[in-house]
Structures are given as C-alpha cells and as structure tokens.
Image (cartoon, rainbow, N blue to C red):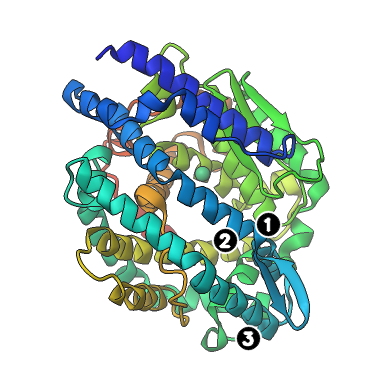
Amino acid sequence: MDLDAYRQEAEAFVSALDREYYLHFSGQRQELEIEPIYERHAELVSARAVEALRAAGSRELLEFAVQGHIGRETEELAAELARREASLEVTVDGRTLPFRQAPVAQANEPDPDRRAAIEAARNELTARELDPLLREVFERTRALVRELGWESVLALCEELSDIDLRALCARSEAFLADTDGAYERVVAPRVESELGFGLDRLRRSDLPALFRAPGLDRHYPAERLLDAYRETIDALGVNGRGVRLDVEERPQKSPRAFCSPVRVPDEVYLVISPHGGREDYEALFHESGHAQHYAHVDGSLPFEQRYLGDNSVTESFAFLFQHLTSDPHWLGERLGVEDPSELVAHSRASKLVFLRRYCAKLGYELELSSAAGPLDRLRDEYARRLARAVRVEWPRETWLADVDPWFYAARYLRAWALETHLRRHLRERFGERWYAQREAGALLRALWREGQRRDADELLADLTGSQLDFEPLLAELVG
Ligand SMILES: [Zn+2]
C-alpha cells in the first residue's frame, strides 16, 4: 500500500467533512451533506483498506480506517436517528418544545418539578423513539467489529488506541472511592446556594441547572467574553495565524461554541455566539484551547500526527484554557471579580460531579462493549453505576444514548489528569500568573507544534518525568 497517497486522500476527506460540519453548524448552510463526501472517498474506509493498513502496521491510520468503515456502514441508521431526533417534540404542561431544545429549556427552568417533567418527557421519547435505532447501531457495530477480526469493541479500542482501558477503569474506580468522603462537603453547598435545597433533594434533572448556575451570571458578562479571550491570547503571545474567529450572528448558528480544524494548521475555525454566563465562558475557552493547539501544529508533520492520535492531548489543552475561567487570579485580572471564592467553589463542585460521572461511564461502557449475549441487564447496570457515582436516582432510558463512541470518555479522563499535571508544571515554572507570561506561551507553542505525535503519557513523561495519574487532580478537588 502506498501510505503517502493514502495520507493525502485521508486528509482531503477529513478536511471536506470538517468544512461541511463548519458550514452547517455555523449556520451558513442548511443541509449537512456527508454522504457525497463518503461516496467520493469510499475506498479509504473499505474493508480492503483496513486489511492493507493492518499489514502496513500504521496504528493511527488503521484506527482511522476502522472507525471510518464502521461509520460508513452504519451511516443510514445514524442519519435516520438524526432525522427522528430533529422531528421529535416534548410536551410539558401544554407547552411544546423541539426535543433538541429541551435540555436548554431544562437548564434554564427555575422550577425543579418542571425540570423533572421535561426530563421525564425526554427520557420517555428516548426510550420509545430512539432506543430501537440506537440498539441497531450498537448491534451492527458489534457485528462489523467481529467481521474485521476483533472479538469485541473493547478489544478493538484497546489495540487501536494503545490505551489500557481496563487499567484506566481500575484507576477510575479508585478515584470514585477516594472522592466519596469529600463529595457532600464539596457539592452540597453549591447545590444549596444555586438551587435552594439540599443534596438529599437533588434529582438528576437538576444537574443542568446546577452547572448552568444562573446566580453567577453577573460575573460572566457577554460583552466581556471576546475581549477576555483576546487579552488572554495576546498576553501569552499565542495567537495562531490559522485561527479564524467566527462571531457573526446567524439564525441557524449553533448556540454552543465549537472548533473546526478544516486545514491543520492553516484554517481552523473557532465559532461562537457570545451569550455570557459561566458555561459560555467555559465553552469558548475550551474550544479556543483546541483551536490554538491545531493552529500551531507544524505543517510538515504527517497527516496522522496533525489530525489523528491521542485526543487526550488536544482535550488537555482545551481543559487548560477552560480552567482559566475559574482561576482566581485570572478572574480578578480579566473580569474584575473581587471575591472569586464562590466561582472557584462552583467550578470545583461541577468538576467533581463531571469526573465521577465519567469514571462511572467508563466502567459501564467497558461492560457494555465486551458484553456477549442479551443486553437488557446492562440498563440496570448503567443506572446503578451512575446513581452511585453522582448520588441521585439515575434514569435507565439513556443507557445507549449516553454512550460516547470509541471510549471518548477515556480521552476526557486522561485529559483531565494531563491538564492538572500540565497546569501544576506551568505554575511551578512561571508562577500563579503563568497565563500572562510570554515564556509560558512559548512552552505551550512548543508542545502544540507536535500536534498529537506523542500520546498523553509520553508528553507528560518527557515534560516532567511524571506518570499520568489522578493524584494532582485528587489533591485539587478533595485535598
Ligand atoms: Zn474538547
């Protein structure tokens, strides 16, 4: 197989897909036309290409081809799922909303019983309308994985990601045990303060409102968002030439910030609709971490090191920037917050809930992806694990809708770990105000140049000699 020719075509394919996503979700094009792109590059993700790449021994390209192959084979189901999801409506107390808008309405709803009603209606629709299709996608994926010669999705993911998922799962279980004792102390005061009741009355349907935290909106004004971002990038001296900021208002534009690396490093879109509020700041800074990372990658690196590899790395840079929005010094300096303690405490509580949720998800997804035989008991397993981690009753209906493809949950967990190590290193070398030092920016630029040539473990070992563990994260969250 001519690997260079393969790389070239794969890059054209990924670039075309990203451009299509960018145009659709930035509200510039109504249609999302993925099928013709797959059509044009069908051979890239054929079973024959998978075989040839296996023989050629390129793990990253093989992972890309396998995921692409399964994506293409299940594409009609995915399209049907998207169509159905887009057409569903949730009706609560005589008020009707599009299914996809319901989470936003739920997060903004001040009445806890109405939040619960919206969520119950969504879950009911998920079980009735989406679950049969999700199950088909799951079964079809499982069959395709076996056809390609792996015994399970778990076996495939472990081999192609080169991540020991079972070891990570064991560390996640330890993390759950190590944070059990502090959970109430960290989370309860924030529930009380934002929602007005105790942890004992918290329901799953309240979590989006907890994360949303409207009580903190005054500290995160919409009109400061872009300037705070620009000042931060300028102070670090890290404005990548390829970053194209898309702030134009369009009726169909996604309300949530996203990054689309259409051509790495030369054309990377950072798309936002500034609304203000804690989550909006977090989202913009998160996506800007991705955008700056991609825009600084050395253009002479091969395709797989610029676009593929261990996404724990790009996610860690995203988390690093996201974290600034709850850094007490940054808050004072960029947003003029005089007493940041409430914001810091809220971010810590939210992060603990998130991390424990992802630890539980990883354990569940591990079971799901290696399950043989009937799947039904896994619904209970899903609800049991999540309820234990987050300490609220957890619905069974989202047991498939809540699954991240190809163990993306593992990348997030590794990214949170890497980010805490990285941030500790930056603080030790450049001080508490590392985010305003050019030297810190130079270090980041040097790391970004490599794209994802090294995985998260290698990057950290080379930078600090440390192992990628949850220790600094534990110290920060419950220490
Ligand atoms: Zn991300």
Outermost residue toward the bottom?
200
Name the N-terminal-most of marks 3 and 1: 3
| Residue 332 visible in the snapshot | yes
Find the distance from the CA under tag 3 to the CA under tag 1: 21 Å
Q: Secondary structure at mark 1?
A: helix
Side of 186 where 159 appears, left or right = left
Looking at marks 2 and 1 on the same chain, the residue that comes earlier in the sequence is marked by 1
Q: Residues within 10 Å of mark 2 (few under 14, many from 20)?
A: many
- Residue under the point 76% across and 50% down: 336
**Dot 1 amino acid type:** Arg
| Rendered-image quadrant of the N terminus | top left
User: Is the residue under label 1 in contact with that under label 2 (CB below 8 Å)?
Assistant: yes
Residue shown at the point (38%, 29%) measured from the top left: 452
Please state which of residues 66 and 293 is positioned toward the viewer in this rendering.
66
Neighbor class of circle 1 (other Cα within 10 Å; few <14, some 14-19, many 20+) is: many
Q: Nearer the viewer, residue 286 or 378?
A: 378
Q: Give, as a three-letter code, the residue at label 2.
A: Ser
**Can you give x and y, in whole percent of width and height, for residue 369 in the image?**
27, 58
Q: Are marks 2 and 3 in contact (CB under 8 Å)?
A: no
Name the spot of residue 118 as percent of width and height, x first.
Answer: 65, 76
Which quarter of the figure is the C terminus placed in?
Answer: bottom left
Q: Is residue 462 visible from the viewing direction of this image? A: no
Label annotation for residue 278: 1
Residue under the image location 57 percent in, 44 percent down: 286
Q: Which residue is mark 3?
A: 197
Looking at the picture, tell me which residue is in the foreground, 22 or 458. 22
Q: Which mark is residue 347?
A: 2
Asked which secondary structure carries label 2, the reply is helix
Residue 38, compared with residue 346, is above or below; it is: above
Pick whichever of labels 2 and 3 is earlier in the sequence.
3
